[in-house]
Amino acid sequence: MSPQEADEKIGAYAAREADYAAAQARLRQLESMKAYQRVTAPFTGMVTARNIEIGSLVSAGSSSATPWLYKIAQGETMRVFVSVPQSHMQAAKVGSEADLVIAELGGKPIAATVARNSGAFDPATRTLLVELRVANGDGKILPGMYGQVRFRLKYAEPPVVVPVNALLVGGDGLRLAVIDDTDTVRIRKVRLGRDLGKEVEVLEGLAENERVVNNPRDDVEDGTKVKAVPAPKHDDKKKDEKPAAAPAKSAEAPKATPAPR
């Protein structure tokens, strides 16, 4: 056999091997397409929506094909998404505890745990997307429901909290009237934290268990001697509307209340 004839036979053999490999690939493609005749769910759940019926034509690779066939939801463990503002970013730590409250389910708190967060704030809303996990073995919580989430914040060093009406607002900034051990009023500048509605956090300028004047007058001055009495409780105010303290020098002395935690 001449070398030229041998090369031709070897080249033809290689070409037939390539044709055989292409036929096998085509066969695998057709088998994969045929496997789509059976729709298999990626996880166990319930079909919540369908976009196709039996007998409908679904063309592979067609731009006019149905975008999705079914929607499936798994309700044993629910994922709850919350947009947390920057002022409460400490609540977004993984493992933090929270309570989910849904009015339609009686308003009873449901335990939830922070699973993860987006890791960045949305520049449009300035909020952090947080995902919580809630056990839903009884199936009461349905996908798509809305509710409220209350985070259980834990501080290593809890800030001091005082009533809002104890603040003195003026040109010198925010101040508090504090009564020392000698029953003397001392005006202090303070730095506030979060506004809790009827109360505010004091980050600087006030120590724990110090006595703070509640509803101080605008003309109260540093060094004024007073006779301090505890502020009456809510029930006591209903029974006795008279002032609970008598002043040492003036006719109307401000009442003092200890700064709660």
Image (cartoon, rainbow, N blue to C red):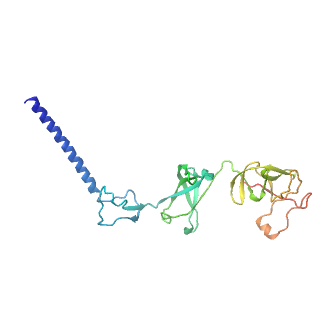
Q: Position of residue 48 (x, y in %)?
A: 42, 65
Image quadrant for the N terminus?
Answer: top left
Q: Residue at x 15, y 36 (%)?
A: 11
User: Which quadrant of the rendered structure holds the C terminus?
Assistant: bottom right
Where's residue 25, x and y in %? 24, 47
Look at 17% across and 38% down and name the residue there: 14
Does residue 25 appear to the left or right of 236 in the view shown? left
In this image, 175 relative to 125: left or right? right
Q: Is residue 8 above or below residue 94?
A: above
Q: Residue at x 22, y 45 (%)?
A: 22
The reply, left or right, for residue 247 in relation to residue 155 is right
Answer with left or right where residue 241 lies relative to residue 128. Answer: right
Q: Position of residue 72 (x, y in %)?
A: 41, 61
Q: Nearer the viewer, residue 244 or 32?
A: 32
Q: Quadrant of residue 162?
A: bottom right
Figure label count: 0
Q: Name above or below for residue 87 compared with residue 17.
A: below
